[in-house]
Amino acid sequence: MRNITLTWTRRAAQATAVLMGGFGLLFGSAAYGQTIPVVAEPAIANQNNDAIYEQAAARLQETLAPAAEGSLTSEVSLTSGEAGCAPACESSCCDSCCNSCCECESSWCDLGEPCDLGDKIFGECSDWDIGGWTQWGYHSEANGLFNKHPHKVQNHQSWLYLEKVADGSCGMDWGFRADIMYGVDAADTQAFGNPPGSWDFANGWDHGIYGFAMPQLYAEIASGDWSIKAGHFFTLIGYEVVTAPDNFFYSHAYTMYNSEPFTHSGVLATYAASENVEVYGGWTAGWDSGFDSFMDGSNFLGGASLTLSDEATFTYITTIGDFGWRGEGYSHSLVLDLALSDEVNYVIQSDLVETNAGADHQYGLNQYLFYAFNDCLKAGLRGEWWKNGDNSQYEVTAGINYRATANLIVRPEVRHDWNPGGQNIVGKNDYTTFGVDAILTF
């Protein structure tokens, strides 16, 4: 028996692979810089040699690397262990479990295998995927930033997407993606930068506080280090996003809601200049546009993402030109993401918007601090200063992410907003909000 050790060289979402074949069963998982022992058991007992395990490590590495969006290194140790278990350590904490000592401390966290609709319909190796989520939440106060309907349990997002991944690693390939959603977040997800009645905006898709939106519909081609998408797609700008599963907090920052577009319509190219540099550039029909443009919006969208080290990434994204409903001007978002340790992650973001639309001079400074106890439990803190003209708005949010299963996450939070100079966008200047939501992915 041999233990294959795999180490992520950059932060990545959890990746899991199971391979069956001449090497028997291999299982591996890694998340956020962890080093995970993986046991490979040959199907034939007398194939207990280093070459077999080196080949098994390579097979597992090839499977995990695409999901990691990063690189992976592997090495073969000659330590023996019981089948299905990592080598025992000296501490008695490992007497009752099959993992390393540090993992025994959080052995209560067992996410299980995720339920993936795309794998069930298209198979695990297909370029095609289908999936989505449903998000339900409650908040005690309205802040005007998506969370606008207090004191009621509501369906924020019921989301479905269909896509074919454009994989240019072996030459020219094509892909596409289509997203449709229903919920109270629809009004903020529609292309409200369009003239009324165009695409999904003010065209009868709403009823009461609920509605439908189609925030993405684009085609993509990829070849080698290049990819180009054309159509209706989410913005690159900022740290927080519209899609609920991709945010830590239930509530949103003032900066994200007021100083960043949500969607664009146009053409966007991506070029992987090296392993550490990715460059973006394209044209869009203004902010929040959907195959149309209000007041003839036309602007540049682009920037770059730099991997500074295994622990640090920096992203600069800008829009320059006519933003349509938002006027003509310049905006940018700067995001520095630091992994301070295996458990601690710090993010700082700064946004700037300057346009000729009245007093549209905005600045935002957001900071995030996260601590991962294990794969099931994570704590977070967000502090924000957002300035609109001469008016400064502040908020601090503390929350927890509890992942009950691989498909279900619960996000309680407490948030305090205050405005020393007056009132915020919903007419308040000092208030505290409790909120909680649950997201079920499929």
Image (cartoon, helix red, strand yellow):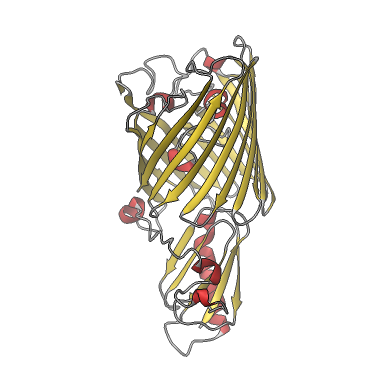
Coordinates of residue 411 in the picture (x, y in percent): 43, 43
Q: Is residue 36 above or below residue 342?
A: below
Q: Is residue 61 left or right of residue 214?
A: right
User: Residue, x 52% and y 28% (percent of image)?
Assistant: 266
Residue at figure coordinates x 46%, y 74% from the top left: 98
User: In screen coordinates, is 61 left or right of 334?
Assistant: left
Q: Is residue 359 above or below residue 310?
A: above
Q: Residue furthest right?
A: 308
Residue 113: x, y in percent? Answer: 38, 60
Residue 221 visible to an observer of this rendering: yes
- Considering depth in this image, is 212 or 413 the residue closer to the camera? 413
Tell me if I can see residue 86 in this picture.
Answer: no
Quarter location, residue 138: top left
Estimate the x, y position of residue 182 in percent, counting from the top left.
33, 32
Q: Nearer the viewer, residue 359 or 99?
A: 99
- Going by the image, does 401 lie left or right of 317? left
In the image, 414: left or right of 187?
Answer: right
User: What residue occupies the far left of the structure in this picture?
Assistant: 207
Which residue is depicted at the point 35% across and 51% down? 118
Total numbered badges shown on the rendered structure: 0
x, y percent for residue 264:
50, 27
Taking depth in this image into account, of 78 and 431 the one nearest to the observer is: 431
Going by the picture, which residue comes out furthest to the top? 358
Q: Nearer the viewer, residue 408 or 225?
A: 408
Residue reaching furthest bottom? Answer: 46
Q: Residue at x 44, y 41 (%)?
A: 412
